[in-house]
Image (tube, helix red, strand yellow):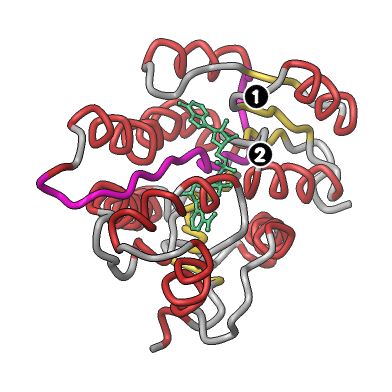
Amino acid sequence: MNLNGKRALVTGSTSGIGLAIARALHAEGADIVLNGFGDEAEIAALCKEMGAKYSAANLLDTAEIEAMMAEAGPVDILVNNAGMQFVSPVEEFPVDKWNAIIGLNLNAVFHTTRLAVPAMKEKGWGRIINTASAHSLTASPFKSAYVASKHAVAGFTKTIALEMAQSGVTANCISPGYVWTPLVEGQIPDTMTARGLSRDEVINDVLLAKQPTKKFVQPEEVGALAVFLCREEAGNVTGANWSIDGGWTAE
Ligand code: NAD
Protein backbone atom coordinates (compact mmCIF):
# COMPACT_ATOMS: atom_id res chain seq x y z
CA MET A 1 0.00 0.00 0.00
CA ASN A 2 2.30 2.74 -1.27
CA LEU A 3 -0.30 5.42 -1.71
CA ASN A 4 -2.04 5.46 1.66
CA GLY A 5 -3.20 8.96 2.52
CA LYS A 6 -2.78 10.27 -1.03
CA ARG A 7 -5.80 11.79 -2.77
CA ALA A 8 -6.05 11.02 -6.48
CA LEU A 9 -8.39 12.75 -8.91
CA VAL A 10 -8.77 10.82 -12.16
CA THR A 11 -10.72 12.61 -14.87
CA GLY A 12 -12.78 10.51 -17.25
CA SER A 13 -12.70 7.60 -14.84
CA THR A 14 -16.21 6.22 -15.31
CA SER A 15 -15.01 4.14 -18.25
CA GLY A 16 -12.05 2.57 -20.03
CA ILE A 17 -8.50 3.59 -19.20
CA GLY A 18 -9.43 6.14 -16.51
CA LEU A 19 -11.45 3.55 -14.62
CA ALA A 20 -8.55 1.09 -14.75
CA ILE A 21 -6.16 3.79 -13.46
CA ALA A 22 -8.56 4.69 -10.63
CA ARG A 23 -8.87 1.03 -9.65
CA ALA A 24 -5.10 0.55 -9.72
CA LEU A 25 -4.46 3.63 -7.55
CA HIS A 26 -7.24 2.58 -5.18
CA ALA A 27 -5.65 -0.87 -4.84
CA GLU A 28 -2.45 0.89 -3.67
CA GLY A 29 -4.37 2.74 -0.97
CA ALA A 30 -5.13 6.12 -2.60
CA ASP A 31 -8.37 7.97 -1.90
CA ILE A 32 -10.08 8.33 -5.25
CA VAL A 33 -12.15 11.11 -6.78
CA LEU A 34 -13.90 9.87 -9.91
CA ASN A 35 -15.14 12.05 -12.75
CA GLY A 36 -16.92 11.42 -16.03
CA PHE A 37 -20.31 10.71 -17.49
CA GLY A 38 -22.41 7.56 -17.38
CA ASP A 39 -25.30 5.71 -15.86
CA GLU A 40 -26.07 6.98 -12.37
CA ALA A 41 -26.44 3.52 -10.81
CA GLU A 42 -23.21 2.28 -12.40
CA ILE A 43 -21.33 5.33 -11.11
CA ALA A 44 -22.81 4.83 -7.63
CA ALA A 45 -21.58 1.21 -7.75
CA LEU A 46 -18.07 2.37 -8.71
CA CYS A 47 -18.05 4.87 -5.84
CA LYS A 48 -19.07 2.10 -3.46
CA GLU A 49 -16.48 -0.33 -4.85
CA MET A 50 -13.63 2.14 -4.28
CA GLY A 51 -15.04 4.19 -1.44
CA ALA A 52 -14.61 7.03 -3.92
CA LYS A 53 -16.02 10.52 -4.25
CA TYR A 54 -17.45 11.58 -7.59
CA SER A 55 -17.65 14.78 -9.59
CA ALA A 56 -20.03 15.02 -12.53
CA ALA A 57 -18.17 18.07 -13.89
CA ASN A 58 -18.30 18.56 -17.63
CA LEU A 59 -14.67 19.38 -18.38
CA LEU A 60 -15.66 21.44 -21.39
CA ASP A 61 -16.88 24.05 -18.91
CA THR A 62 -14.17 25.98 -17.05
CA ALA A 63 -16.51 26.94 -14.20
CA GLU A 64 -17.41 23.27 -13.67
CA ILE A 65 -13.72 22.36 -13.57
CA GLU A 66 -13.11 25.06 -10.99
CA ALA A 67 -16.01 23.77 -8.87
CA MET A 68 -14.72 20.16 -9.16
CA MET A 69 -11.23 21.16 -8.03
CA ALA A 70 -12.58 23.19 -5.12
CA GLU A 71 -14.81 20.30 -4.01
CA ALA A 72 -12.03 17.73 -4.36
CA GLY A 73 -9.73 19.78 -2.14
CA PRO A 74 -5.94 19.46 -2.42
CA VAL A 75 -5.05 16.50 -4.61
CA ASP A 76 -1.71 14.69 -4.43
CA ILE A 77 -2.19 12.83 -7.70
CA LEU A 78 -3.87 14.37 -10.72
CA VAL A 79 -4.58 12.09 -13.65
CA ASN A 80 -5.80 14.03 -16.67
CA ASN A 81 -7.36 11.22 -18.60
CA ALA A 82 -10.72 12.36 -20.02
CA GLY A 83 -10.54 12.55 -23.77
CA MET A 84 -12.53 12.24 -26.94
CA GLN A 85 -11.94 11.40 -30.57
CA PHE A 86 -13.55 12.21 -33.91
CA VAL A 87 -12.53 10.87 -37.30
CA SER A 88 -13.04 12.96 -40.44
CA PRO A 89 -11.13 14.45 -43.37
CA VAL A 90 -9.95 17.91 -42.34
CA GLU A 91 -12.02 19.79 -44.92
CA GLU A 92 -15.18 18.19 -43.52
CA PHE A 93 -14.15 18.25 -39.87
CA PRO A 94 -17.11 19.70 -37.91
CA VAL A 95 -15.99 22.91 -36.20
CA ASP A 96 -17.87 22.03 -33.01
CA LYS A 97 -16.05 18.67 -32.85
CA TRP A 98 -12.69 20.39 -33.32
CA ASN A 99 -13.46 22.83 -30.49
CA ALA A 100 -14.69 20.06 -28.17
CA ILE A 101 -11.63 17.87 -28.75
CA ILE A 102 -9.22 20.74 -28.11
CA GLY A 103 -11.38 21.81 -25.14
CA LEU A 104 -11.43 18.42 -23.45
CA ASN A 105 -8.10 16.88 -24.49
CA LEU A 106 -6.03 20.05 -24.02
CA ASN A 107 -7.73 23.03 -22.36
CA ALA A 108 -9.16 20.97 -19.46
CA VAL A 109 -5.66 19.63 -18.75
CA PHE A 110 -4.41 23.20 -18.38
CA HIS A 111 -7.26 24.13 -16.04
CA THR A 112 -7.00 21.14 -13.68
CA THR A 113 -3.22 21.47 -13.61
CA ARG A 114 -3.17 25.20 -12.82
CA LEU A 115 -5.65 24.57 -10.00
CA ALA A 116 -3.91 21.49 -8.55
CA VAL A 117 -0.34 22.74 -8.59
CA PRO A 118 -0.37 25.27 -5.70
CA ALA A 119 -1.27 22.62 -3.07
CA MET A 120 1.23 20.13 -4.51
CA LYS A 121 4.02 22.72 -4.35
CA GLU A 122 3.07 23.61 -0.80
CA LYS A 123 3.24 19.94 0.24
CA GLY A 124 6.44 19.38 -1.70
CA TRP A 125 4.95 16.28 -3.34
CA GLY A 126 2.73 15.68 -6.30
CA ARG A 127 2.17 13.53 -9.36
CA ILE A 128 0.61 14.79 -12.58
CA ILE A 129 -0.08 12.05 -15.10
CA ASN A 130 -1.57 12.93 -18.46
CA THR A 131 -3.05 10.22 -20.62
CA ALA A 132 -1.71 11.33 -23.98
CA SER A 133 -1.53 8.76 -26.78
CA ALA A 134 0.72 7.24 -29.40
CA HIS A 135 -0.85 10.11 -31.32
CA SER A 136 1.18 12.52 -29.16
CA LEU A 137 4.25 11.18 -31.01
CA THR A 138 2.95 10.25 -34.44
CA ALA A 139 -0.03 10.99 -36.67
CA SER A 140 -2.77 9.15 -38.53
CA PRO A 141 -4.92 10.64 -41.28
CA PHE A 142 -8.43 11.92 -40.43
CA LYS A 143 -7.59 12.57 -36.76
CA SER A 144 -6.35 16.16 -37.06
CA ALA A 145 -7.93 17.51 -33.87
CA TYR A 146 -6.98 14.51 -31.76
CA VAL A 147 -3.38 14.39 -32.98
CA ALA A 148 -3.01 18.16 -32.52
CA SER A 149 -4.44 17.99 -28.99
CA LYS A 150 -2.25 15.05 -27.93
CA HIS A 151 0.96 16.55 -29.35
CA ALA A 152 0.06 19.70 -27.42
CA VAL A 153 -0.50 17.77 -24.19
CA ALA A 154 2.94 16.18 -24.57
CA GLY A 155 4.52 19.64 -24.88
CA PHE A 156 2.46 21.00 -21.99
CA THR A 157 3.56 18.10 -19.79
CA LYS A 158 7.25 18.68 -20.49
CA THR A 159 6.82 22.37 -19.66
CA ILE A 160 5.08 21.64 -16.36
CA ALA A 161 7.78 19.08 -15.47
CA LEU A 162 10.41 21.79 -15.87
CA GLU A 163 8.42 24.34 -13.88
CA MET A 164 7.94 21.83 -11.04
CA ALA A 165 11.38 20.24 -11.21
CA GLN A 166 12.50 21.42 -7.78
CA SER A 167 9.12 21.14 -6.06
CA GLY A 168 8.82 17.37 -5.55
CA VAL A 169 6.12 17.34 -8.21
CA THR A 170 6.54 15.23 -11.34
CA ALA A 171 4.60 15.48 -14.60
CA ASN A 172 4.58 12.71 -17.16
CA CYS A 173 2.54 11.44 -20.07
CA ILE A 174 1.38 7.91 -20.58
CA SER A 175 0.94 7.24 -24.28
CA PRO A 176 -1.06 4.12 -25.05
CA GLY A 177 -1.50 2.60 -28.47
CA TYR A 178 -4.91 1.10 -29.15
CA VAL A 179 -6.72 0.03 -26.00
CA TRP A 180 -10.09 -1.64 -26.50
CA THR A 181 -12.45 0.88 -24.87
CA PRO A 182 -15.68 2.66 -25.92
CA LEU A 183 -13.50 5.44 -27.42
CA VAL A 184 -11.92 3.01 -29.89
CA GLU A 185 -15.13 1.14 -30.60
CA GLY A 186 -16.86 4.47 -31.31
CA GLN A 187 -14.43 5.47 -34.05
CA ILE A 188 -14.86 2.29 -36.07
CA PRO A 189 -17.99 3.33 -38.03
CA ASP A 190 -16.50 6.71 -39.06
CA THR A 191 -13.20 5.06 -40.00
CA MET A 192 -15.15 2.55 -42.12
CA THR A 193 -16.74 5.51 -43.94
CA ALA A 194 -13.59 7.65 -44.19
CA ARG A 195 -11.50 4.77 -45.57
CA GLY A 196 -14.19 2.69 -47.30
CA LEU A 197 -13.40 -0.42 -45.24
CA SER A 198 -15.35 -3.15 -43.42
CA ARG A 199 -15.38 -3.39 -39.60
CA ASP A 200 -12.90 -6.29 -39.58
CA GLU A 201 -10.62 -4.46 -42.01
CA VAL A 202 -10.63 -1.40 -39.73
CA ILE A 203 -9.73 -3.52 -36.68
CA ASN A 204 -7.03 -5.60 -38.36
CA ASP A 205 -5.71 -3.39 -41.17
CA VAL A 206 -5.96 0.04 -39.51
CA LEU A 207 -5.89 -0.36 -35.73
CA LEU A 208 -3.86 -3.49 -35.05
CA ALA A 209 -1.76 -2.86 -38.16
CA LYS A 210 -0.09 -0.12 -36.10
CA GLN A 211 0.88 -2.44 -33.24
CA PRO A 212 3.67 -4.92 -33.91
CA THR A 213 2.40 -7.10 -31.05
CA LYS A 214 -0.96 -7.41 -32.90
CA LYS A 215 -2.70 -7.09 -29.56
CA PHE A 216 -4.78 -4.33 -28.01
CA VAL A 217 -3.21 -2.79 -24.90
CA GLN A 218 -5.14 -3.71 -21.74
CA PRO A 219 -6.50 -0.90 -19.54
CA GLU A 220 -5.00 -2.66 -16.49
CA GLU A 221 -1.53 -2.40 -18.05
CA VAL A 222 -1.98 1.37 -18.23
CA GLY A 223 -3.15 1.37 -14.60
CA ALA A 224 0.02 -0.42 -13.51
CA LEU A 225 2.19 2.16 -15.27
CA ALA A 226 0.30 4.98 -13.53
CA VAL A 227 0.96 3.31 -10.16
CA PHE A 228 4.67 3.12 -10.93
CA LEU A 229 4.79 6.84 -11.76
CA CYS A 230 3.23 7.60 -8.35
CA ARG A 231 5.84 5.64 -6.41
CA GLU A 232 8.68 7.30 -4.50
CA GLU A 233 11.13 5.43 -6.78
CA ALA A 234 9.72 7.43 -9.71
CA GLY A 235 10.58 10.77 -8.12
CA ASN A 236 13.21 11.44 -10.78
CA VAL A 237 10.97 10.41 -13.64
CA THR A 238 9.57 13.67 -14.93
CA GLY A 239 8.89 15.24 -18.30
CA ALA A 240 8.78 11.78 -19.86
CA ASN A 241 6.34 10.41 -22.39
CA TRP A 242 5.86 6.71 -21.63
CA SER A 243 4.80 4.65 -24.61
CA ILE A 244 2.67 1.59 -23.93
CA ASP A 245 1.79 0.81 -27.51
CA GLY A 246 2.91 -2.70 -28.43
CA GLY A 247 5.90 -1.25 -30.30
CA TRP A 248 3.89 1.13 -32.56
CA THR A 249 6.15 4.15 -32.14
CA ALA A 250 9.34 2.06 -32.26
CA GLU A 251 8.85 1.59 -36.00
P1 NAD B 1 -13.58 6.20 -22.86
O1 NAD B 1 -14.49 6.79 -23.89
O2 NAD B 1 -13.75 4.79 -22.43
O3 NAD B 1 -13.54 7.12 -21.57
C1 NAD B 1 -13.56 8.52 -21.67
C2 NAD B 1 -13.91 9.07 -20.29
O4 NAD B 1 -13.96 10.49 -20.40
C3 NAD B 1 -15.28 8.61 -19.79
O5 NAD B 1 -15.25 8.46 -18.40
C4 NAD B 1 -16.17 9.79 -20.18
O6 NAD B 1 -17.36 9.89 -19.40
C5 NAD B 1 -15.22 10.94 -19.90
N1 NAD B 1 -15.60 12.18 -20.56
C6 NAD B 1 -15.91 12.36 -21.87
N2 NAD B 1 -16.24 13.64 -22.09
C7 NAD B 1 -16.13 14.28 -20.89
C8 NAD B 1 -16.35 15.61 -20.46
N3 NAD B 1 -16.74 16.58 -21.32
N4 NAD B 1 -16.18 15.92 -19.16
C9 NAD B 1 -15.79 14.96 -18.27
N5 NAD B 1 -15.56 13.68 -18.62
C10 NAD B 1 -15.73 13.35 -19.92
O7 NAD B 1 -12.13 6.43 -23.49
P2 NAD B 1 -10.70 5.78 -23.18
O8 NAD B 1 -10.32 5.02 -24.39
O9 NAD B 1 -10.65 5.14 -21.86
O10 NAD B 1 -9.82 7.10 -23.21
C11 NAD B 1 -9.27 7.69 -22.05
C12 NAD B 1 -8.07 8.52 -22.48
O11 NAD B 1 -7.10 7.68 -23.10
C13 NAD B 1 -8.38 9.62 -23.49
O12 NAD B 1 -7.64 10.79 -23.18
C14 NAD B 1 -7.90 9.02 -24.79
O13 NAD B 1 -7.57 10.01 -25.73
C15 NAD B 1 -6.70 8.24 -24.32
N6 NAD B 1 -6.26 7.18 -25.21
C16 NAD B 1 -7.08 6.13 -25.52
C17 NAD B 1 -6.62 5.14 -26.35
C18 NAD B 1 -7.46 3.97 -26.72
O14 NAD B 1 -7.05 3.21 -27.61
N7 NAD B 1 -8.60 3.73 -26.11
C19 NAD B 1 -5.33 5.20 -26.87
C20 NAD B 1 -4.52 6.27 -26.54
C21 NAD B 1 -4.99 7.26 -25.69
Residue 82, magenta (yes or no): yes
Q: Amino acid at mark 1?
A: Gly
Give the number of the disc on residue 15.
2
Occupied quadrant, residue 135 = bottom left
Of residues 229 and 46, the one nearer the viewer is: 46
Q: Which residues are magenta?
A: 72-91
Work out how far the residue at label 2 is from the one at label 1, CA to CA, in angstroms.
8 Å
Q: Chief secondary structure of the magenta span?
A: loop
* Residue under pointer 1: 38
Q: Position of residue 194 (x, y in %)?
A: 28, 56
Of residues 189 and 83, the one nearer the viewer is: 189
Q: Position of residue 47 (x, y in %)?
A: 81, 25
Occupied quadrant, residue 123 = top right
Q: Amino acid at mark 2?
A: Ser
Q: Earlier in the sequence, mark 2 or mark 1?
A: 2
**Which residue does the image show at 56% across and 79% down from the upper left?**
246
- Drawn side of residue 69 relative to residue 51, left or right: left
Q: Secondary structure beneath disc 2?
A: loop
Q: Position of residue 212 (x, y in %)?
A: 52, 86
**Which residue does the image show at 63% across and 44% down from the upper left?**
18
Would you say the residues marked 2 and 1 are in contact, meaning their CB atoms lie under 8 Å apart? yes
Of residues 30 and 183, the one nearer the viewer is: 183
Q: Is mark 2 within 8 Å of ligand 1?
A: yes
